[in-house]
Image (tube, rainbow, N blue to C red):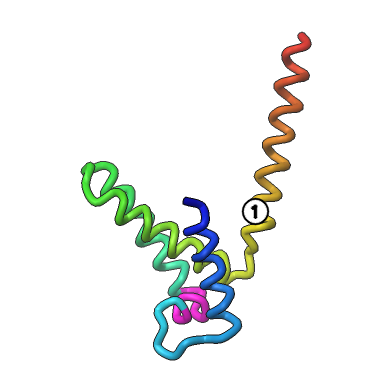
Amino acid sequence: MLSTLESLFNLARERKKDPVDGSYTNKLLSDKSLSKEKVLEEINELIEAVENDSNKIHEAADVFYHFIMYLEANDVKIEDVMEELNKRKKWVTIVIIFLQKF
């Protein structure tokens, strides 16, 4: 399951390194404004789909794809994001352990 997300990150990095003419992915990676616009658009479409209980999976997939391209276009590495999430997880665990002692 997570290998699909990893494949999308790899695709983005490959396309940044070796662009493909006419590629939508390359368009998103090279135009930060378009990338941002698409993320916002897709998030709104997902919210609407969830509220209407229709097409949720399709719209969620669009959000993931466009968000990954947005992160890569702006040199935000998923490895750094995961590290930050792990730090937060550790901090929450420490707080919980501390609070349980009282």
In terms of depth relative to the viewer, which is nearer, 76 or 32?
A: 76
Residue at numbered disc 1: 81
Count of picture labels: 1
Residue at the spot 54% in from the left edge and 60% down from the top edge = 6
In this picture, residue 42 sits left or right of residue 79: left
Q: Position of residue 32 (x, y in %)?
A: 51, 74
Q: Position of residue 13 (x, y in %)?
A: 58, 74
Q: Is residue 45 visible?
A: no
Q: Main secondary structure of the magenta part?
A: helix
Q: Is residue 73 above or below residue 54?
A: below
Q: Position of residue 39 (x, y in %)?
A: 42, 62
Indicate whether residue 28 is drawn in magenta. Answer: yes
Read off the magenta span.
26-33
Q: Secondary structure at mark 1?
A: helix
In the rendered image, which quarter contains the C terminus?
top right
Residue 94 in which image quadrant:
top right
Q: Amino acid at mark 1?
A: Val
In terms of depth relative to the viewer, which is nearer, 100 or 31?
A: 100
Residue 101 in which image quadrant:
top right
Residue at the spot 46% in from the left edge and 75% down from the top edge = 28
Q: Residue furthest top?
A: 102
Q: Position of residue 80 (x, y in %)?
A: 69, 56
